[in-house]
Image: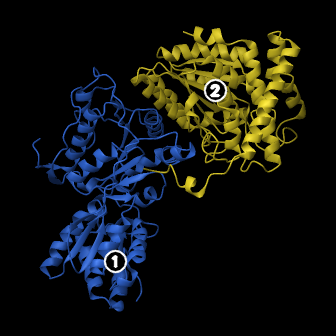
Chain colours: A yellow, B blue
Amino acid sequence: MSTETSSRVSPLDLYARMALIRRFEQAAYRAYERNEIEGTVHSSIGQEGVAVGVAFGLRESDRMLSHHRGHGHALAKGVDPRRLMAELFGRATGVSSGKGGSMHATDLSCGFLGSLAVVGSSVPLAVGVGLAARRAGEGAVCAVYFGDGAVNQGIVYESINLASIWSLPVLFVCENNSYAITTPAERVTAGEGIAARAATFGVGTLSVDGQDAQAVREATERLADDARAGRPGLLECHTYRFLGHSRSDPAHGTYRAREEVERWHERDPLTLLRLGAGLAAESCEELEHEAQTRIEDALQFARDSPRPSLEDLEKDVWG
Amino acid sequence: MSPDSEVPYIEAIKAALQDAMRADETIVLLGQDISAGFPFGATRGLAQLFGEERVRDTPISEAATMGCGIGAAMTGTRTVVEVDFAGFLLLGLDQLVNNAAKLRYMSGGQLRVPLVVRVGQGPFGSFAAQHSQSQHAWLAAVPGLALCAPSTAQDAYDLLRWALRAGDPVVFAEDMRLYRRRGPLRRAAREGAEHVGESAPPARLSALDVQEDVPRARVARTGRDATAVCYGFGTTIATQAAAELSAQGIELEVLDLRLLSPLDEAAIGESARHTGRVLCLGDDPLLGGITGTLAAAVEERAHGELSAPVARLGARHVPTPFGSREAFVYPSAESIVRAVHRLVAWPAPAQAQELEIEHGELRMAPG
């Protein structure tokens, strides 16, 4: 089942996409600091291994739903960085016509169904997407992301239960970065964690090192294949965001110790892949350079694009 | 069922579901106990006709059920979510308001959510304050949702068929007091009724880009002296009040809104200008209730042509009480008759104040 994905994925592909996400996030953060981007941005720097591992473990025809920290997920699934950056800039050329912003990018052309900002609220949608896919006989899986902060939302368990009793092609992906904004997961989460909780619903579960993109991809392929065959799954990825939750909190010094952050920096997913897969330094530098060029182009595209007109703002409400 | 036979409102709803499911094989029903048709019978027998793949009993998980309906609807499976009682809708309200109503907008028009949420409204069966509520004003205030409030068996059928062809989410507010009331029903011609059940190949979703006109308000009864602007069960009691008033020589026009969002303000203005005296009738309390919006529409569209200040009649500002006393806190044919008397007798401010004290649900602007 997974040969379609395996055959087209090389470690360099994974590295290139992670580099693109890293550069995108850095550029978006700086643009936000310069007030070019309004609202807020939630950086996924440090979590690229999860985004790329999951997306490359799925088929192109599979669908994906995300949450407020979703830029990396979108880019990994194939969203054009120019149109994603334009969305962050609130421009009419953005993937969501500039009306969704950083937290609500959607691009149906590559199966990225959208990001939702109410924690855990995209999870039941994936169950419905799985239901529709099965009724249409498509064989497509829907992967849905949520964080460790969402594991205490009741709707997550209602959804896992529904997917399980109806044997739907859904892959639940928990990005466990250990903090719900400032609150450490262990302070608010009883018991053995999300994978153990999910297992009691009869779905397949795997916990992996989210900094290891290849491990994430392999686990995704396994669980997605099972989901396609009628057994939904849950993948827990242990990861870390290198920056704060948003701009309002620093990377360390308040709720996270400097030593902890530095320890995780030693497990940077790009470095781990480069060393683990034995990638040549020059090849990686070349990919970094390409990524930087694409992101600069994306920034320029966003800056040059118009904002939605008042007429645009009244479109697509009802009817 | 022969054309034009008299059927209960609840049977008209079932007929609409059945005919729509035949015409559009993507339609799936989700809800608690729906294969058994519990508690009111709206879905009884549909699982036998269409299979459990299309008529799905859900666990008691209202929030996830709503979200599942949204996810299915936005990817090609038109979905009906049944919520028996208004109080339980609140568990799914985050999904309905934050997702169903906003996904099309937030995605720049890429996503469409052809979801219908059937929900019982109003006081019924002595189920007390949590089951029995009126949520029209809340729901009408959400951009991205349409809100139907049908008043007759025929309208229950026609509006539900319309909702099941719409490209965007529709909340179908069924007043539970109407479920057993009978009325004539003519069913639409069956489109593509060849395949039924699980063996049928999945058909295309009804085209979302072919938008039908939104149903307009209808004049349920013509009159020259005053207008009752109403919906749902309100149309029933306004019509009863009109008969009593007619015997007294007062002709009440009954304007049945059918939908509360989009709201047919033009029809409200037209009737208000015609009679010059308007009573806005609602089932929620006056503070923040739908009657405030209706009264504003009357003022904005007919101000110079009104012979009396616009009047409002709604529920008292209390939760629905237990038992048969529930009817006392909602408008009735009797309270409508009294309110129309006040309107027609205007100006008589002292009397109006007296009435306001006696019946807290009635408000008229001071002269």
Whether residue A60 sits left or right of residue B239 in the image: it is right
User: Residue A267 versus residue B314: which sits nearer the camera?
Assistant: A267
The residue at which mark 1 appears reads as B359
Q: CA distance from mark 1 to mark 2?
A: 61 Å
Chain of residue at mark 2? A
In front of the other: B245 or A190: B245
In the structure shown, which secondary structural element does the residue marked by tag 2 occupy? helix
Q: Which mark, residue B208?
A: none
- Point 64% across, 22% down: residue: A55
Q: Residue flagged by tag 1: what amino acid is it? A: His
**Residue A243 spot, x, y in % from top left:** 81, 36
Q: Which residue is at 37% across, 47% downward?
A: B211
Looking at the picture, does residue A138 appear above or below residue A92?
Answer: above
Q: Position of residue A160 (x, y in %)?
A: 52, 27
Q: Nearer the viewer, mark 1 or mark 2?
A: 2
Task: Specify few, some or many for label 1: CA neighbours under 10 Å numbering under 14, 14-19, or 20 or more.
Answer: some
